[in-house]
Image (cartoon, rainbow, N blue to C red):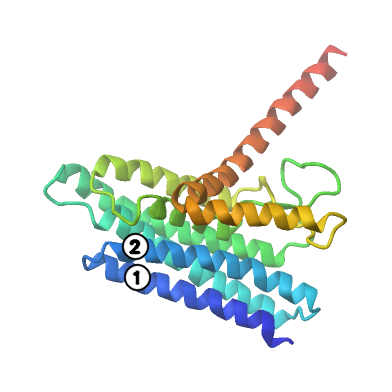
Amino acid sequence: MYVLPSLFTAGNIAAGFYAITESVRGASGDVGAFNRAALAIGFAVVFDGVDGRVARMTRTTSDFGKELDSLADVVTFGVAPALLAWVWGFRMLSPAYLPAVRNAVLPLGVVVCFLFLICGACRLARFNISVNPQPRNPGRPGRKYFVGMPIPAGAGVIASVVHCFDGSPISDPRVSIVWLLLIVGTGFLMVSSWRFWSGKEIDSNGRKPFQFFVWMALLIAVIWRFSEEALLAIALAYMVSGVLARLAYAWGRKRRLAAEVRQ
């Protein structure tokens, strides 16, 4: 039984390695390989969510499993999306179109994609050593939140954008600047101390399991039919939710301080 969750972790690593090989293949001219790499990262997100739940359900959690899961996440959600982001968004830029902008963006792209990888690794390290971490902007009492955006969600942002464009790489250097800013923002959110919804309160064995499975079936059907738009919307909505939660907390705190001053 202890092998079962590790099998899903191995699937996570396999998907990450496949995404890396497809990114390299895409750099050689196979544009469809970028989309396959993005889909592989998406499947790895599922594997990453399943292995922990399987370990808790079968009561087979172990230090070995936790370490293996962290190493798998560095490869699949750190190295693979960083390489995909650089090749898809910067490496494939045409040297004949706006060469001055391209020459300026290319080295910045290398640095930014490396920073994404470092931010993801730091996010994992902080998660591993933290005991009951609390976000800087606390949420509802009794609810569990992630401190900083999880690295699978960060990789999901990269993969969902690539998949939304069906793997067709960026050709305009000006668009690659927007891509660069998105990568920077994603990396910052991973190392931030802002709260993000963990989803740990979701219980398929709760008092209304039928409704849970109906909603899950509906979500899967929407993703299956409109995968490009649905996955992009889910990834960006999750990313923006942390920003909005931080802004809402700051605004509420400012109002409370103003009310205390008036009193």
Element marked by disc 1: helix
Residue 198 visible? The answer is: no
Q: Is residue 159 left or right of residue 251?
A: left
Q: Which residue is mark 1?
A: 22
Q: How many marks?
A: 2
Q: Residue at coordinates 78% horizontally, 57% vertically from top-left?
A: 210
For the C terminus, the image quarter is top right
Q: Nearer the viewer, residue 57 or 17?
A: 57
Amino acid on which the number 1 mark rests in the picture = Glu
Q: Residue at x 39, y 71 (%)?
A: 20
Mark 1–mark 2 Cα distance, whole angstroms, equals: 6 Å
Q: Residue at x 34, y 58 (%)?
A: 86
Q: Is residue 257 above or below residue 12?
A: above
Q: Is residue 144 left or right of residue 38?
A: right
Circles 1 and 2: CB atoms closer than 8 Å:
yes
Residue 91, percent from left and from top: 26, 58
Q: Residue at x 34, y 70 (%)?
A: 22
Could you say which quadrant of the image residue 107 lies in? bottom left
Instruction: Determine which residue is flagged by label 2.
Output: 34
What amino acid type should be assigned to the residue bearing mark 2?
Phe
